[in-house]
Structures are given as C-alpha cells and as structure tokens.
Image (spheres, rainbow, N blue to C red):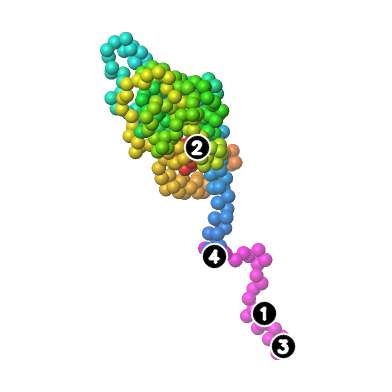
Amino acid sequence: MSIVEVSAQTRDWISPPPMNSNFVEPKSMLETTIAYVRDIIPKIGLMLLASFVLLPFLFGYLTQNRDQAALINNFSAVTGLAAAAASTQDLSPLPSEPFAPGTASGYMSIPAIGLQQVIVEGTGADQTRKGPGHMAGTSGFGQAGNAVVIGRRLAYGGPFLRLNQLKAGDKIEISTIQGTSTYVVDPKLPAIESGALSASTDNRLTLVTSTPPIAAVGLTTVTASLVGKPFIDFPQAPSWTAVHPLGNTGHPLPVLALMVLSLILVFESLRFVARTFTKSVTWMIGLPIVLATGIALSHVLDMLLPPSL
C-alpha cells in the first residue's frame, strides 16, 4: 500500500460524515418568539375587529329590541301600580330614592321621527345599549328644570340616528309613573351658561347624541320646552354618578388585556384540538368557544367607546 493511499484513507476516516440535506438548524428562542407573535397578532386583530363590529352594529338592533321588551314589562308593572293609586291619596308609587341604573324611568314617543323607546336610568355603556338613558344629576321627566336624555347614534339600533331631523314645533311625549308630559322642540331656548347638560331655570328636555355618526367627537343636542305645569319632584341620582355622552364607563383596559390573553389561550387550545381530533370535531368544539369569547370581548370593547355612539 502506498503512502498516498494510506493518507487518503486517513483523511476519509477523520472527515465528518456528509450532512443530511433535510437537516434544519434549530431556531433561537428570540426567533421562535418573533415567529409566534407574527402568527398570533393577525388572528387577535381579526378577532378584535370582528368583536367590535359583531355585537354593537350587526346584532345590536336585535339585542336592543330584546332589552326594550324586558324594560316595557318592567315599566308597565310600575305604572300599573301608580295608576291604581291615582284616584286616591296614596303617594307610595312615587319613589323615595332614585331609580336604580338600568331600570325603566320613562317611555318616550317622538312621532316626527318615528321613535318609541323606553328610557333607562343612567348613561353608561351598559345602560345606553338598552335604550336612551336619563342622565344622573338632571331633573326627572315632567319635573322642574332640565331633564337630559342621551341616546346612541349608530350602535345598538341607533335610536337617536335621526335626532338632528327634529325641527321647531315637533312634539315629544314622555310617560312616567306621574303621568304623561309633553315637550315642544324649541331651538330658540336660551343656552345654559354652564352647558347644555346642566341645570336650568326653565323647564326643558335636552336630547343628546354624538356627531358625526361614526367619529363621535362632538354632540348633537335638541332642546324642548315643557308644556304645562311640572310634576312634584322626587329624588334623582346624584350628578357625580353621571357618565358624559363622550366619555366611557370605567377602566376596561386591564379587562381588555385579560381578554387578549384569553384569546391566545383559546387559539392554542384549538391548535391542540386540531392536532388531536378531526376537522368536524374541531369545529364543534371550537366554534361555540370562539363565539362566546367574541361576545364577551365585544362588551369590553364597547366600554371603550362613547355611550352615545
């Protein structure tokens, strides 16, 4: 054996084996994290967008009708007790404390724009998704002073969508446990120095919604004068509990963060299910979970929006 042959054999022996062409070098933790974030962010963004549109704008009309039906039953029961005591000296139907937030406080009819809605007590997002809300700290309907009602412009059926179409002389009727009060739209009513949502020396109704309809950066207001003498006052919710029509109802950002984490958990769970079961089983298990998460997320997102949108 020649020296050249031995050298060739030695070289072959110490040379590394040929690399597998299918071998993939493992990614670092940073690369793995970046890839995961790129994968999950579009899904979360799509879910957030769907939740924002789903309940308030697509199904909001249906949920608002359901809530209005429940409020009508509640309001009918209360006014029935008041009507039974109307011909007596019994004043027990008059509340001794303010209406609880979310309960019916009146029934409003505006023939000029075809509006008939039960008014709820309170102007937070939870209240105005049920119907127009009576603002805390303002007068009761048919009573002395300025009664303020805030309604949504687009979301949840948009009961105040056509509010800007009201003109001088249009009538607004509001029924309460004290009876029915008539207001007449009067754009020439003197402005209240401290703002349209503040107390007034005259007896008026102020209807408020957002403008423009989508952006909701300003307010559209309609003022109307009370016809006749006011009713006896009874306690109203204090002004410090009021929610401004362009404000929001609390601090939902921590809840939103938890919801995003829940979405990540849902997506990861569905990945596991998809690897373990068939596609049909994955849909059966995953669809109800995704819908329930989307509805819950929609309520949280709604808290970030003005209650007059």
Mark closest to the chain's N terminus, 3 or 1: 3
Magenta region, residue range: 1-29
Mark closest to the chain's N terminus, 3 or 4: 3
Q: Which residue is mark 1?
A: 12
How far apart are the two marked residues, 3 and 2, measured between alpha carbons?
95 Å
* The N terminus - image quarter: bottom right
Give the amino acid type for the residue marked by disc 3 in the picture: Val
- Which of the labelled discs sits on residue 28, or is there none? 4
| Residue 227: x %, y % from top left | 43, 19
Q: Label 3: few (<14), some or many (≥20) within 10 Å?
A: few
User: Marks 4 and 3: in contact by CB < 8 Å?
Assistant: no
Mark closest to the chain's N terminus, 4 or 2: 4
Corner quadrant of residue 239: top left
Q: Is residue 11 left or right of residue 294?
A: right
Does residue 131 belong to the magenta stretch? Answer: no
Asked if one can make out residue 114 in the rendered structure from this viewpoint, the answer is no
Corner quadrant of residue 83: top left
Does residue 3 belong to the magenta stretch? Answer: yes
